[in-house]
Amino acid sequence: MKPVLLFSMLLGLYGFLCLDSAVYAQNAGGPSHTRAAEHVGETVADRASEHYRFETFNLVSDDGQRHYRVQVGIPRIQPPQQHILYMLDGNAAIATLTADHLAQLASGNAPVLVAIGYDIATRNDVVSRAYDYTPPVFLNGERLENPVVRGRAGGGAGLFLELIDTQVKPKVRSLVDANGEEWIWGHSYGGLFALHVLFTRPESFDAYIVGDPSAWWYEGALIKEWEGFDLAQATGKRVGILVGTRPRPAGRPAPDDVVLNTGDGRSLSPREAVKEIAKGLQKVAHVEYREFPDAGHGEMIEISLLHALRAISNVKLDLLEPVSCQRLDDPTPLMNILQP
């Protein structure tokens, strides 16, 4: 082989490996898991089903920077009480569901499924979700514009909630005659957003189901919201917090290693802070907190989503259920404690 050709091949291989390493580093160091760039392909929303029909509409943020695809799954047979589950990270959420899941949901109190995603071919737009799903940050009483964490601007949760309230919900209500409750599910940054909404606009939803919420974000901005939250506003709410506690692989940054400082001078890990939030909410709300020692962060997408679906539908969906599980004091199953 000619030296020039060999050098070109080696250079190309080096470039590929560097690019692959850079992508891994971005995903490992960024707020989303490594499957974010996976192509979604055909989902249950694209295939004919005897149990659900799907409607899709698109939205654009006011500043034109973020483009959304909202997929609405409507049961073909409406139950007596029609609940709605709003699912964040909609592309990944809809890719998680199967035809069997739809059939199982239809055998119970089938909810309307609203997958709020981004208008892209992959599971996630990591830049857009970093902005949309993270709360505002205040330093010395002044709001910090576009706080940056791991190279991505955040702080847009208020605008995103406004988009849900003023554009997504009205459109969904024009498509379905829902007479039940409105639930929200989110994982990771999506869980961070859901808890932010609970602590700032608790009337927005009747139930909040979160998987592995990113309480570590911006030195615990969520914890500061929790400390300023009037607990009485959560009275009667349903809250499910599901956490995967399996150690991360070697070489992967672990956000849970961040130390959060509370207003009363204590230092907590993000996981300890989330458990403390669950215990506090338990005083006034219907709360289920569960730890899954056999599940990692990525697996909690499926676990938490399917738990939310079986709780809202009263159907025991087939789901990934780690053998071991740790709860708070209340041993009542999630499906029972959260049932509408």
Image (cartoon, rainbow, N blue to C red):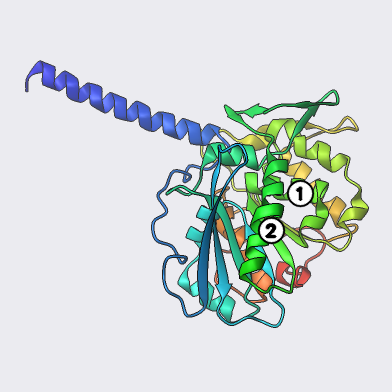
**In the displayed structure, would residue 70 be above or below residue 247?**
below
Quarter of the rendering containing residue 154 = top right
Q: Give x and y (percent) for residue 203.
A: 82, 57
- Residue at horizontal 68 percent and vertical 60 percent from the top: 170
| Crowd band around label 1 with a 10 angstrom C-alpha radius: few (<14), some (14–19), many (20+) | many
Name the mark on residue 235. none
- Left or right of 12? Residue 255 is right
Q: Is residue 224 left or right of residue 39?
A: right
Residue 264, quarter of picture: top right
Tell me the SS state at disc 2: strand
Q: Residue shown at 73%/74% (left/top)? A: 179
Residue 249 coordinates in the image, percent (x, y): 51, 40
Q: Residues within 10 Å of mark 2 (few under 14, many from 20)?
A: many
Q: Is residue 254 visible?
A: yes
For the residues labelled 1 and 2, the Cα–Cα distance comes to 10 Å
- Residue 308 shows up from this direction: no
Which residue occupies the extreme top position in the image?
3
Look at the numbered disc 1 and give the secondary structure of its residue. Answer: helix
Q: Position of residue 241 (x, y in %)?
A: 72, 55
Q: Amino acid at mark 1?
A: Val
The residue singled out by tag 1 in the image is: 197
Residue type indicated by callout 2: Ile
As drawn, the label of residue 184 is 2
